[in-house]
Image: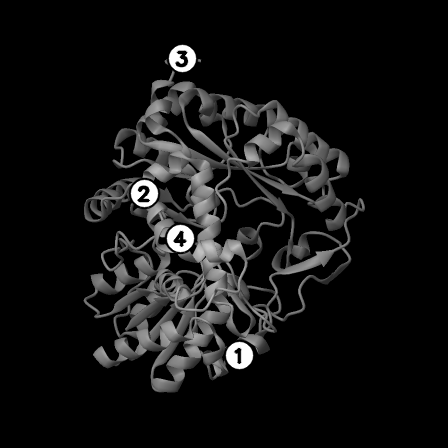
Amino acid sequence: MLLIYPPVAKPSEPPAGLAKLSGALKAHGIRHRAVDANIEGLIYMSGSASSRPYEGTDTWTRRSIRHLPGNLSSLRDLHTYRSPDRYKRAVKDLNRALEFSSGENGARAGLADFQQTGLSPVRSADIIYAAEHPEENPFFPYFRDRLTTLFEESQPSVVGFSLNYLSQALTAFSMIGYVKSILPKAVIVTGGGLVTSWMRGPSWQDPFRGLIDHLVAGPGEYRLLSLMGAPVKEGPHITPDYTTFGADEYIAPGFILPYSASSGCYWKKCTFCPENAENNPYRAVPPDRVISDLDKLVGETRPVLLHLLDNAVSTSLMKSLQADPPGPPWYGFARINRDLTDIDFCISLKRSGCVMLKLGLESGDQDVLDRMHKGIDLETASSVLKTLKKAGIGTYVYLLFGTPSETAAGAGKTLDFVTRHGEEIGFLNLAIFNMPVSAAVYGNFDKSSFYDGDLSLYTDFTHPAGWDRRSVRKFIEEEFKRDRVVASILKKDPPVFTSNHAPFFLDWARMREKIVPSC
């Protein structure tokens, strides 16, 4: 069996989904190969940049190509992260070089994005066209040579693709089309987060019959085991396997270990949340098994950072990590709750290795939070931010503008909340609300196509207060971002890699010295 993670996704860490599939197959003695074609393809593309004639291009592009090897090396050096301006230039230059090297046939590949002129990843006809014409994809020279070599070494009976983001869709299907052309008898299996969202949408009708043999929604390890003749009842936890991924391949200052201690969301009450609308069940790995897994995986991979991928790290897991720290620094999402207002709890969390928590605040208007059923109290949120600051734990706060319950006045309250907590908020993520197709049933809205495509995950809607996307965007650009406090926070955000690299900008040793014994 061959497992593939296609371009393009942020290349800072290995794909956790592929590692979990690999762990399941390995545990049952099934021979397989897991290939992170995302990082391989991007490195291949960057290497080809200097071979293209670029004398007639602009100064920035010429500089980006000349400095490409140095920029790639510098982003793998922690010292670069001590100089934000140097880091930002390296990221932007590397992204520019990739866009140049992929620019034939109107395509553009970056470190976290992919576009192909005339094709949309939300139209099944375009995706099928990509499969029928793989040679038009800029990654074709890479995957043609790579897959040909792999198939010469073995003839896999099953080829699986893990597809999580729209930025992967066109290249994934280009690769599928090529596999079908040179290995027509291979069984094609495709799963991952994006496929799950497609299949659990309200109007899903499989448009890929004849191209993909098995589409898998949700966890795919047991489906793969069944296909390979090793049926296992779903339930037993399987430790992921990262030994197939090179520790020095990724664009980060060391190996980042991603790990999921749960799937789904334990809160699962937020209006318009896809986890709720798609009815994804919450499944948590027992904390003692998480600790055992991390002990094994840390020993194997020697990570510089641990990334917990849960929708929200549970309090019970936090307590287990406090009692038995994993070793490397770690970060992840957490729900804003009373536990994080306890300075002793947060100091213990810091000592366990926690260097940053991502917090989905969404709004600084209590009425908006209540109507979204977020279960967040702004007074508690304020206390959480202040307590984490005192404990030396960084914060990456997520805001969501333009929800059906928000108004211009409510957005103003969010601005006020942020400015009052500018000292406690380390980083900000700003997003404009997109109505998920699967969640539109939660309100009586006039709806229209958001994207022109049968695979679109979102629908446009008429805001009940007239707070449309244009007004929201204008507020963000002309008021929110121009606030002095907000601007100073946004300036710190790592371009492209955002929260994936943000922990490296926190001085862990200096912050530990700032831990206080009591509130």
Q: Position of residue 132 (x, y in %)?
A: 49, 83
Q: Is residue 470 left or right of residue 244?
A: right
Nearest-to-viewer mark from 1 and 2: 2
- Quickly name the residue at label 4: 67
Mark toward the start of the polypeptide (1 vs 2): 2
Circle nearer the N terminus (3, 2): 2
| Residue to which mark 3 is pinned | 518
Q: How would you rate the neighbour count of disc 1 (Cα within 10 Å): few for under 14, some for 14-19, many for 20 or more?
A: some
- On residue 239, the disc is none
Say which quarter of the image contains residue 484: top right
Q: CA distance from mark 3 to mark 4?
A: 49 Å
Residue 72, horizontal then vertical, whole percent: 36, 52
> Label 3: how many residues lie within 10 Å, few (<14), some (14-19) or many (20+)?
few
Mark 3 in CB contact with mark 1 (< 8 angstroms): no
Q: Nearer the viewer, mark 3 or mark 4?
A: 4
The residue that disc 1 covers is 128
Position of residue 344 measured from the top left corner of the image (x, y, whole percent): 38, 19
The correct choice, above or below, for 44 with respect to 14 in the image is below
User: Amino acid type of disc 1?
Assistant: Ile
Q: Are the residues flagged by discs 2 and 4 in contact, CB closer than 8 Å?
A: no
**Residue tagged by mark 2?**
77
Residue at the image position 46 percent from the left and 79 percent from the top: 134
